[in-house]
Amino acid sequence: MTKLVGIVLVSHSSELARGLAEVAAQVAGPEVRVEPAGGGPDGSLGTSGDVVREAIARADAGAGVVVLADLGSAVLTVRHLLKTELNGQVRLVDAPFVEGAVSAAVTSAAGAALDDVARAAEEARGARKL
Amino acid sequence: MITERDLDAATVSNWMREIESVIRAERDHLVQLDAAIGDGDHGTNMLRGFEAVVQALGADSGSPPGRLLVLAGRTLVSSVGGASGPLWGSALRSGGRVLGDQATFEGQELVEVLAAALASVKDLGAASPGDKTMVDALEPAVDTLRERVAAGAPLADALDEACAAAEAGGRATIPMQARKGRASYLGERSIGHQDPGATSTGLILRALQRAVATGS
């Protein structure tokens, strides 16, 4: 079967990341690896490079990984990892956290390639609710 | 008297210990500054990070100064938890790589270390002078140090002037409106507060000045 693009959700809060992973996985189905990476090094609010690195490794099924981040230091932490140690199969996208995660997960479930999943997440910025 | 090739691994270790000590002393001040325009964790995050750095460097035996800086940077990324982790982490890693495996370094190389650190912070944070960030303290310090060292000033004097430039740069963030980081969500309400990252940058450079003086 086709390898699916993994999704990593980086948030300052482990509960926010876990909750969003739950929502995205529910919408996308069980085949897509949606991995939360929330909280700081001591489990408090913040971002941990180690937690993000491990989540990316778990999400990678061989088709690449799309990473979404909530705010500030979460974005900086992922950018730092991308610059220093990760290969081109990991993509940080500029997308709204919730809509982007759902969009990316659904697109991945359909078997889309890394570029298409990343684009789907970024295009979620234009999605209207009303 | 500081001689031409006086800086070494001990300088880096002393620098990290001096940072931990000054951040500990100033933690509440940094927390207050950050509580005004951020989430109030800057002093706590920085202290946790540099405590971990001092511990990591204490467990190291015999690495050259550049490797110690890289180790310090890597430790910050995994231990700080806030934006300062990747920012100072990449700064120290980039600075450390400038030195490679050489056992000692001189003033001009220290300029290059700090210039690489600045470049890495600007690149990672996509910040420019005037955005009300640590760049507003670090850039004038690096510029001043480069000019004074090039003019043949003793390193201790050049560092003193660089620290003064960083502190002036920190104070100059007070009237700025933040364009990066969490303070940027405040818009005009960020005006009137000194940036915590620019403030701790001044402390980190003063710590460097003390570490260099200790080695003389």
Image: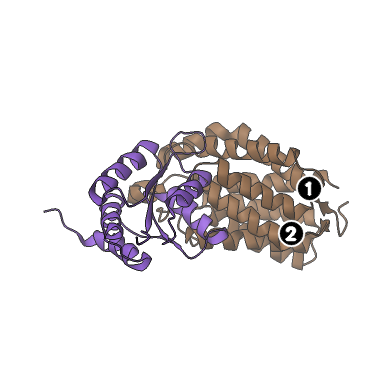
Chain colours: A purple, B brown
- Does residue B124 appear left or right of residue B161 in this picture? left
In primary-sequence order, the first of circles 1 and 2 is: 1
Do the residues at discs 1 and 2 belong to one chain? yes
Q: In this view, which residue lies farthest toward the left?
A: A130
Q: In the picture shown, does residue B22 fall above or below B91? A: above
- Does residue B144 appear left or right of residue B31 in this picture? right
Tag of residue B11: 1
Q: In the picture shown, does residue A40 fall above or below A73? A: above
Query: How far, Cα to Cα, is label 1 from label 2?
Result: 11 Å
Q: Chain of mark 2?
A: B
Q: Using the rendered view, name the quadrant where residue A123 is placed.
A: bottom left
Query: Crowding near pointer 1: few (<14 within 10 Å), some, many (20+)?
Result: many
Q: In this view, which residue lies farthest toward the front?
A: A1
Q: Nearer the viewer, residue B51 or B127?
A: B51
The answer to whether residue B18 of the structure is visible from this angle is no
Query: Crowding near pointer 2: few (<14 within 10 Å), some, many (20+)?
Result: many
Residue depicted at 64% across the width and 55% down the height: B93
How far across and how far down the image is residue B149, in percent?
76, 63
Q: Using the rendered view, name the quadrant where residue B16 is placed.
A: top right
Q: Which residue is mark 2?
A: B110
Q: Chain of mark 1?
A: B
How far across and how far down the image is residue A73, in percent?
45, 48
How far across and how far down the image is residue B127, in percent?
48, 60
Residue depicted at 23% across the width and 49% down the height: A27
Residue depicted at 56% across the width and 34% down the height: B27
Q: Nearer the viewer, residue B120 or B1?
A: B120
Q: Nearer the viewer, residue B25 or A1?
A: A1
Residue flagged by tag 1: what amino acid is it?
A: Thr
Query: The residue tagged with tag 2: helix, strand or loop?
Result: helix
